[in-house]
């Protein structure tokens, strides 16, 4: 299955894609049109909404923080939506950087990467984030179990959305290499077309906030080392990612698999 085949083709939501088609350890496959991931739907066009309605999206899960969602809005989607705020990694890093004061030397790329790594660990450690991801996993199982589709997003569709996608795919038994490949597709999607336009705007905004000399790519990209950190934290604390899903997040893996997988 090619990346192009998972592209939902949404003009205003260029990082929207289908998680269907991945093969799992038991030989079954993730059903197409059931698990959808994206950035926020604030720029979705009417044709984009038609695509989502045509796919039978019955629930949108919004992982953005309260203030973040209030500031940016929900966009034109008027269907069912559940707000499950998880820690905003990029915003947390920005607050830390800006709180250091205007005379502080810019962080180098290694230092910024280390901060991002620690923020990904917080996806596992932070109770509010665990609560959000737990709620999302159970809502996904509920919705998919009715034969309906669910879309989940944060703001940029890279960190919180990327971690939730990694959790879902891992719980379904998708090979770790495919989990990483899906996670890293965000970098490709943000380097061309509408995705590149959005990235350019974000970089310009960050330059105004942090100055021209501040390295930004650790904030802009997703990197394997980030996902490594979250998985390692889960494995250290729970013994395995599967046990983290069950004990740490209260996910019924059998129910999730029966809801999403097909022969």
Image (cartoon, rainbow, N blue to C red):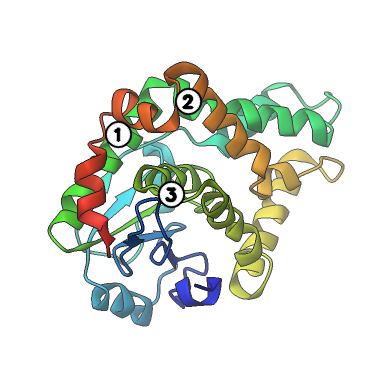
Q: Which of the image's four quarters has the C terminus? A: bottom left
Q: Residue at x 75, y 39 (%)?
A: 210
Residue nearer the viewer, 119 or 200? 119
Residue 20 in the figure: left or right of residue 122: left
Dot 1 alpha-carbon crowd within 10 angstroms: few under 14, some 14 to 19, many 20 or more = many
Label 2 element class: helix
Residue at image mark 2: 234
Closer to the chain start, of discs 1 and 3, is 1
* Residue at mark 1 to residue at mark 3: CA–CA distance: 13 Å
Give the residue at the far top of this rendering: 237
Q: Residue at x 47, y 30 (%)?
A: 123
- Label of residue 165 in the image: 3
Q: Residue at x 42, y 20 (%)?
A: 238
Dot 3 alpha-carbon crowd within 10 angstroms: few under 14, some 14 to 19, many 20 or more = many
| Residue 244 x/y as whole percent | 38, 27
| Residue 189 x/y as whole percent | 60, 66
Label 1 element class: helix
Select label 1 or label 2 by which is in front: 2
| Residue 146 x/y as whole percent | 12, 58
Is 31 situated above or below 206?
Answer: below
Is 203 situated above or below 100?
Answer: below
Residue at image mark 1: 134
Question: Which image quadrant is residue 133 in?
Answer: top left
- Label of residue 217 in the image: none
Question: Which image quadrant is residue 227 in?
Answer: top right
Q: Residue at x 73, y 21 (%)?
A: 100
Closer to the chain start, of discs 1 and 2, is 1
| Residue 98 x/y as whole percent | 69, 29
């Amino acid at each position: 299955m090619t990346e192009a085949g998972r592209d939902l083709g949404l003009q205003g939501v260029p990082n929207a894609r289908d998680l269907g088609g991945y093969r799992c350890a038991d030989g079954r496959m993730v059903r197409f049109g059931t698990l959808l991931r994206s950035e926020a739907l604030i720029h979705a066009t009417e044709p984009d909404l038609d695509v989502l309605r045509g796919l039978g999206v019955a629930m949108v899960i919004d992982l953005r923080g309260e203030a973040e969602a209030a500031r940016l809005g929900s966009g034109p989607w008027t269907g069912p939506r559940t707000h499950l705020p998880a820690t905003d990694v990029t915003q947390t890093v920005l607050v830390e950087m800006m709180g250091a004061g205007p005379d502080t030397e810019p962080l180098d790329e290694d230092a910024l990467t280390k901060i991002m790594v620690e923020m990904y660990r917080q996806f596992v450690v932070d109770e509010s984030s665990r609560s959000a991801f737990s709620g999302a996993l159970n809502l996904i199982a509920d919705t998919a179990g009715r034969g309906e589709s669910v879309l989940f997003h944060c703001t940029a569709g890279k960190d919180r959305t990327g971690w939730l996608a990694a959790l879902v795919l891992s719980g379904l038994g998708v090979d770790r290499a495919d989990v990483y490949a899906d996670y890293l597709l965000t970098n490709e999607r943000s380097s061309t077309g509408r995705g590149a336009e959005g990235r350019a705007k974000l970089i310009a905004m960050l330059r105004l906030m942090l100055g021209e000399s501040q390295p930004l790519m650790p904030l802009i990209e997703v990197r394997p080392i980030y996902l490594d950190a979250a998985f390692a934290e889960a494995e250290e604390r729970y013994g395995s990612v599967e046990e983290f899903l069950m004990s740490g997040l209260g996910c019924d893996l059998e129910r999730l698999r029966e809801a999403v997988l097909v022969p």
